[in-house]
Image (tube, rainbow, N blue to C red):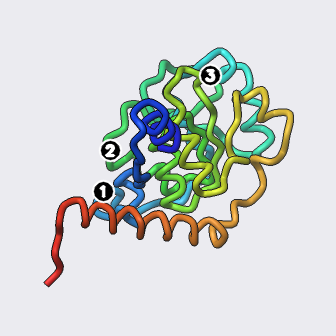
Amino acid sequence: ELEGAKILKETFGKEATIVLDPTLLNDSYPEISGKVIQRKEIVCYKLNKTQDFWNYMPEVAKKAGLPALLLNHNYPKKGYKYHFNPTVNQWVSRIAGAAFVLTDSFHGVAFSIIYRKPFAAVLNHNGKDSRLISLLKLLHLEDRLFNNLEEMTKTDRWLATIDYKKVEPYLNELKKQSENYLLEALDYKTI
């Protein structure tokens, strides 16, 4: 990520090549997701369920006009649908079929982008947000980034449509650069 490249340069004087996370090198994962069912729901893949999440998620869901589905390990809580302990196949399928994705996970964001889903990314402020921030900067999607859900309730920018036609040139260029770098690093020769 950008932060790692900066640290490498400042600390060791070495230039780093930014490559995409391998998940982003594919356009979709039908072999994993199977048949995707489109659902009118907010898929919440939130690794850190803070008090802010529980306090403001009902307001976010109301503003979006969609029910919230919690997609991971959660204890039942009134007002939410659950997909408890999903398999990888179910996880990919639910994100691919979501009307909206709310996540604090890098891969939650990556798969939202792969499947061209509207999403909001919430920072954890735990020192592990740099990959997520870097990806959104590289794709010019910083407007999808929020400090917390309370911040989301004070704006409508997360409800704006993501114009993936503007994102695709950035993503395609990064894919091309990443594939070229990896093939060169592996000394791969095409026949």
> Which residue lies most toward the left here?
191
Q: Is mark 3 on a helix, strand or loop?
A: loop
Question: Which amino acid type is shown beneath numbered disc 2?
Answer: Val
The amino acid beneath tag 1 is Ile
Q: Position of residue 175 (x, y in %)?
A: 43, 65
Real-space Cα distance between discs 3 and 1? 31 Å
Q: According to the image, label 3 marks what residue?
A: 78
Is residue 58 or residue 50 the one in the foreground? 50
With 110 as the anchor, is 99 left or right in this view? right
Q: Residue at x 63, y 34 (%)?
A: 122
Circles 3 and 1: CB atoms closer than 8 Å: no
User: Marks 2/1: CA distance?
Assistant: 7 Å
Q: What amino acid type should be assigned to the residue bearing mark 3?
A: Lys
- The first of marks 3 and 1 along the sequence is 1
Direction front: furthest residue: 13
Residue sitting at x 44%, y 31%: 72
